[in-house]
Image: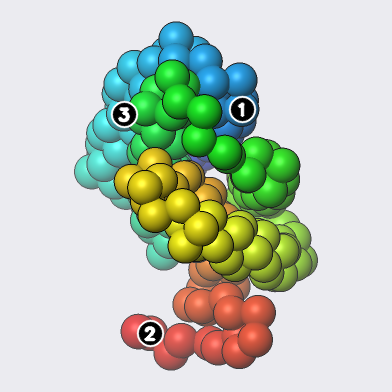
Amino acid sequence: MSRFTLDQEIRLVQDELLLLGSLVEQAILNSVDALQRRDALAARKVYENDRKINGKHFAIENHILITFATQSPLAGDLRLLAAMLEVNTELERIGDYAKGIAKVAMRLAETEHPIPIREISTMADLATSMLHRALSAFVAGDITAAHSIPEEDSQVDELYETTYRKIVEGMIKNPETIDLANQVMWVIHNLERTADRVTNICERIVFIVSGELVEFDVSDEESLDGE
């Protein structure tokens, strides 16, 4: 197959990944908005739209595998296509986190259980901002952004710890609310994990551009030698 055809297929996959990224980004924001407004119908819509995300995920995976099989990619192309598979999986998992938040929003919609929505909304905004910029960096091959974006994960982690303690304090004061409080715990867990998935995407960018496998850790960034 021609170089032109392979480049065209790669661009098509990139476009589809950006579309999937937009879907999961909006799903996170919509699920948190439904939680804030205690809107069960809006939460149900996010929950059901996860099928669209899954369908897009499988279509992209199939496209990449067909490209592997039919386009005779060279070493750099193989690295890019392998990274695309990884990013596709990370996005699908973020979609699952949005679905999980929507599920909690449906459960809490008819309750008056206190929700630390300011912290949750800030976590969602930070995580989706990271995601949006990481995907732009992925398409552009921007290794500088790939190194800088994971540093923001510490802000999400700090909010998680602060909110976690607030929820636990509420449990101690009102043990009868433990079941509902655990639902809120799942929300902040899913948002914290969303930011972690973005960090994984940034690791893939570095791999594409440099061929180096890295594992980002704000306190101890470590290069992995083929592990």
**Residue 119: image location, x then y, percent:** 68, 48
Q: Which quadrant of the structure image shows residue 95?
A: top left
Q: Secondary structure at mark 1?
A: helix
Residue 48 on image: x %, y % = 34, 17
Position of residue 170 relative to residue 222, above or below, is above
Q: Which residue is mark 1?
A: 36
Disc 3 crowd rating (10 Å Cα; few below 14, some 14-19, many 20+) is: some
Q: Residues within 10 Å of mark 2 (few under 14, many from 20)?
A: few
> Which numbered dot is residue 226?
2
Tell which circle, 1 or 3, labels the residue nearer the N-terminal end.
Answer: 1
Foreground: 132 or 179?
Answer: 179
Please name which of the two marks, 3 or 2, marks the residue nearer to the observer: 3
Q: Looking at the rendering, in which quadrant would you find the C terminus? A: bottom left
- Residue 145: x percent and y percent? 74, 60
Residue type at mark 2: give it.
Answer: Gly
Q: Residue 102, can we see it? A: no
- Amino acid carrying label 3: it is Asn
Residue 54 shows which numbered tag?
Answer: 3
Task: Name the residue: 50% across, 35% down.
Answer: 113
